[in-house]
Image (cartoon, rainbow, N blue to C red):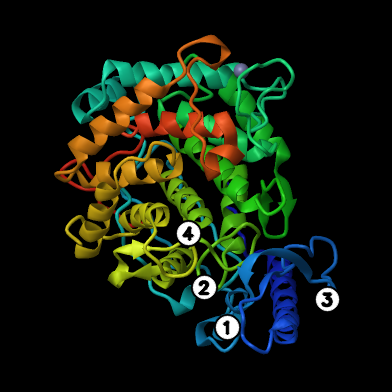
């Protein structure tokens, strides 16, 4: 394979114009922030959406997009006096000191992948474990890990029933939609948005998690069509391949769809996927806010849930032997620091708080980013998750907390697992067109509907084999 270079002349030029555009927009936003700040310093509920990604044709200097949202204006403004941010705009365009995994998965050729914002020389390489791979996703390994790790024949049957339901709700064009009914289906509780790229990525993940790919297994045609759909929906931009779909929802859909592409590539080594995986990951790197997080739209100050999908996408890229700029990883840890409390044991959605869902997301990321099993912050955070217990409705929390506690294999794992596993097996729909699906009403479930809920619940029941251990004798210790 010829080596790709992201540092070609046109790339540099687009990078420079991107940066100039960004600086100008930031200055405009600073001005707007001052203008809009009320004298009593009440939080201004205005999202200052920097239009740094709107310059696909010509940089627009006069039209920063303002939309009503839930971002405090004070938080929305990157700190131009931050020496790291300021220096970065002057730094030479040198790629990060890339790390390379020692443990090979399917693709054998490493590829350089550089974000366009050259923070590389300012930050150190982050050494972190790169366990959590996909070696458990063969039918033999899956059976062994499910049996030894806490799964049951019932939980495995539930996974297969969920996959059958998902396969039955794929559209003829290869996509899945949160609006799953499409006039031919009487399953209740469809979502509130179409979101075809996000829904397609989310639906592909449990197939891949169970060891099925577009090259092997009973669902290879469905998976191929789903991957093809994502590829043809990808929009080439100067900042990478864009899979966003949906207003104020885009980076969710991009991150989830990117994980699906990464996993399919990592599991098969299919070279046809490689350029699309690279472009999608590059888009994530460029969409990161200078303070390290990601939010609904590229370049916005982060929130913990959107950031969670992006970091997991970067992790999946590493498992596919793609090289992720170390500064992107480093900044994502700085983001987590910024929303943490109790020295890093607990996390908030945006401001530092102790919130169950964000804490579950953040602790899983911390584990992937290098915290060791005996880290006191991890221990205290996990105790909080275990004490909170599996939720009857919050699938989002359950999805992350189950992974955290499974990786840790602490004293509370057996009880958590039995409760979570048996609840899902019991509550899975058993009859009619809904057979194999789940729905629980909560804030995420209402928006994502039965399709989202089913994909997430299936992945919870795949926890025994979907990712290999991060800790213990079976873990593969390496760099992120
Ligand atoms: Zn249906």
Q: Mark 3 or mark 2: which comes first in sequence?
A: 3
Along the viewing direction, whichever of 105 and 467 lies nearer the viewer: 467
Is the Cβ of the residue at disc 3 closer than 8 Å to that at disc 2?
no
Residue with the mark numbered 2: 291
Between circles 3 and 4, the one closer to the viewer is: 4
Q: Looking at the image, tell me whether mark 4 or mark 1 is earlier in sequence order.
A: 1
Check the image and name the residue furthest to the top: 432
Front label number (4 vs 1): 4
Of mark 3 and mark 4, the one earlier in the sequence is 3
Q: CA distance from mark 2 to mark 4?
A: 12 Å
Q: Which structural element holds mark 4?
A: helix
Ligand 1's image quarter is top right
| x 51%, y 29%: residue | 439
Q: Residue at x 42, y 71 (%)?
A: 334
- Label 2 with label 1: CB-CB less than 8 Å: yes
- Determine the secondary structure under disc 1: loop
Tell us which disc is closer to us: 2 or 4: 4
Q: Which residue is mark 4?
A: 304
- Disc 4 and disc 1 in contact, CB within 8 angstroms: no
Quarter placement of the N terminus: top right
Relative placement, left or right, of 151 versus 8 is left
Q: Is residue 308 above or below residue 83?
A: above
């Amino acid at each position: 394979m010829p080596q790709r270079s992201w540092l070609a002349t046109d790339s540099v030029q687009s990078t420079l114009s991107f940066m100039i555009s960004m600086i100008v927009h930031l200055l405009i936003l600073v001005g707007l922030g001052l203008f809009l700040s009320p004298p009593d310093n009440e939080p201004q509920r205005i999202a200052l959406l920097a239009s740094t990604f709107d310059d696909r044709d010509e940089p627009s200097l006069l039209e920063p997009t303002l939309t009503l949202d839930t971002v405090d204006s004070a938080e929305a403004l990157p700190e131009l006096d931050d020496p790291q941010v300021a220096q970065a705009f002057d730094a030479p365009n040198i790629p990060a000191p890339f790390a390379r995994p020692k443990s090979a998965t399917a693709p054998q050729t490493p590829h350089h992948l550089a974000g366009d914002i050259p923070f590389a020389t300012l930050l150190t390489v982050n050494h972190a474990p790169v366990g959590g791979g996909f070696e458990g996703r063969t039918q033999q390994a899956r059976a062994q890990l499910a049996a030894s790790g806490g799964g049951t024949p019932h939980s495995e049957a539930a996974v297969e029933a969920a996959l059958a339901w998902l396969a039955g709700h794929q559209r003829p064009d290869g996509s899945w939609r949160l609006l799953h009914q499409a006039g031919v289906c009487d399953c209740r509780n469809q979502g509130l948005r179409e979101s075809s790229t996000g829904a397609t990525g989310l639906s592909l993940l449990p197939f891949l998690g169970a060891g099925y790919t577009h090259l092997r297994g009973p669902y290879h045609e469905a998976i191929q069509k789903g991957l093809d759909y994502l590829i043809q929906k990808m929009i080439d931009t100067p900042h990478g391949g864009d899979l966003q779909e949906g207003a104020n929802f885009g980076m969710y859909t991009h991150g989830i769809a990117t994980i699906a592409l990464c996993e399919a590539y990592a599991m098969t080594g299919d070279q046809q996927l490689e350029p699309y995986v690279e472009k999608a990951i590059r888009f994530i790197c460029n969409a990161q806010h200078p303070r390290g997080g990601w939010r609904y739209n590229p370049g916005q100050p982060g929130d913990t849930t959107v950031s969670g999908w992006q970091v997991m996408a970067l992790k999946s890229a590493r498992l596919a032997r793609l090289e992720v700029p170390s500064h992107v990883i480093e900044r994502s840890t700085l983001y987590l620091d910024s929303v943490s409390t109790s020295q890093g044991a607990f996390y908030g959605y945006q401001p530092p708080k102790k919130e169950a869902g964000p804490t579950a997301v953040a602790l899983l990321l911390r584990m992937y980013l290098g915290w060791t099993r005996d880290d006191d912050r991890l221990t205290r955070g996990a105790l909080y998750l275990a004490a909170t217990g599996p939720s009857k409705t919050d699938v989002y929390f359950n999805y992350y907390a189950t992974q955290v506690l499974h990786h840790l294999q602490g004293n509370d794992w057996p009880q958590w697992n039995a409760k979570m596993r048996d609840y899902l097996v019991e509550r899975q729909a058993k009859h009619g067109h809904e057979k194999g699906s789940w729905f629980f009403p909560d804030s995420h479930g209402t928006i994502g509907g039965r399709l989202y809920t089913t994909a997430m619940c299936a992945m919870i029941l795949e926890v025994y084999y979907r990712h290999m251990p991060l800790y213990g004798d079976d873990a593969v210790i390496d760099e992120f």
